[in-house]
Amino acid sequence: MKTELVDLSPTRKEIKIEIEPAQIRRAYDRISDRYVKAASVPGFRRGHAPKSVIKTRYKSEIRSDVLRELLPEAVHNAIGEHSLAPIGEPDVQLDNSEALGNLGDAPLTVKVGHEVFPEVKLDKYKGLDAVRRTRPVTDEDVQKMLDGLREASASLQPVEDRGAELGDTVTINVQGKFVDEPEAEDIKADDVEVVLGGEGVQQEFTDNLLGTKADETKSFEVAYPEDFTSKGLAGKKVNYEAQVSAVRRKELPEVDDEWAKSLGPEFDSLETLRTRIREDLQARSTSESEHRLRSEVMKKLLEAHTFEVPQTLVNQQTSHRLESVVRDMIGRGIDPRDREVNWEGAREELKVQAEEDVRASILLEQIAEDEKIEVSNEEIDAEIEAIATASRQPKEQVRAALTKDGGERSIAHRLRNRKALDLLIANASVTEEEWSDS
């Protein structure tokens, strides 16, 4: 077998393989003999048909078996001969299909294309310039969080001495008929809570339910805009009949020590609650600042190192990012199938970031290699425990799932890259600057 390596690009390699006729004939004869022993041909006892008859009758099957036997071994040996580490499955193409007509008369030539990791020569990666800006926590920020907790603690109290007002929650049983589509199925829904004047509430509901009381019925028409979020209602007119079952007003708690205690045993006073809110906001601000710093250092590293990356890995990372977008939509209660999304366009946009992800991973791995960074079993165990805690699953269950999917190797790789980035941050030239919203 003869082979020749062709460099198509830093990440694309092609091996030309020539399989000699003698090797092909040996395989052809061996496989033909196997067919002679097993084949049943009319007019001959099993195993006694002439080989020439068998070769003619089973020509296509024998040829396929010869290729299945020769090609994988030839490809494997050629890759080993040139010490290549392919990414993904190689692209194998027969270069002279005419040689299949009479197997063994001429050599078979094959082209094997595959991707490999590029050779990366590291430039400067220590002493990268970066800026750390930490968002200050103000009294206004603390008060905003306190107001949010107060809103979350609000209760709805029945209203009996007046009609519904703006801000009240009106509970209705509603039935709707499409004005221009009488054949369409009616809309029916019970115990619908409508906050009068609330965000996302159609103005017609607010206008017609103002002043209502329990057990009253109101009829009105709603004209939905063309860009309404629900495609089934967009641009449609619906006649509604709404029966009011309850009117309730929001009642906010007094901001005092007793309310603070009701939020948890760790709060013994309003002042303790305020202190904890400020600490949490400061921790969040510090975390945000560190995240921005790490992103900036990584950006500087990428700017200093431009090289071709394997498209197989870029496509895989693009798919991961797209899956993350879909999971996020589902998590927010949005059915991706109901959205008019240009998924092909979205994939192309995500591909740009995916290429940076792959380049960053390759760089961090090279830095980890040069700096001899290792990951211990104890560190992997700690990461698995963190995953188990976050997902609220038993540690052994997480470990079993990860082991099945090869996840522990993936965790080790991620931890190694994280430690490489930690090294970059520790050796960066960081300037402290005041926070700016710009």
Image (cartoon, rainbow, N blue to C red):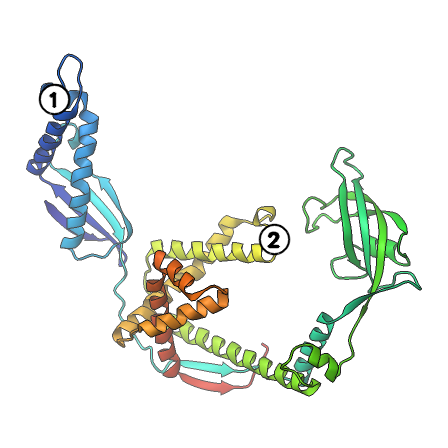
State the CA–CA distance, disc 2 to disc 1. 65 Å
Q: Nearer the viewer, residue 202 or 211?
A: 211
Quadrant showing the C terminus: bottom right
Q: Secondary structure at mark 2?
A: loop
Q: Residue at x 17, y 23 (%)?
A: 39
In the rendered view, does 147 fall on the left or right side of 342?
right
What is the three-letter code of the residue carrying label 2?
Answer: Ile
Residue 306 visible in the snapshot: no
Residue 253 visible in the snapshot: yes
Q: Secondary structure at mark 1?
A: loop
Local crowd at mark 2 within 10 Å, few (<14), some, or many (≥20)? few
- Residue sitting at the far top: 43
- Residue sitting at the far left: 22
Q: Residue at x 14, y 19 (%)?
A: 46
Residue under label 2: 334
Q: Position of residue 56 (x, y in %)?
A: 16, 21
**2 or 1: tag closer to the N-terminus:** 1
Residue under label 1: 47
Labels 2 and 1 touching (C-beta < 8 A): no
- 126 vs 237: above or below: below
Q: Residue at x 79, y 37 (%)?
A: 180
Q: Residue at x 44, y 70 (%)?
A: 386
What is the three-letter code of the residue carrying label 1?
Answer: Gly
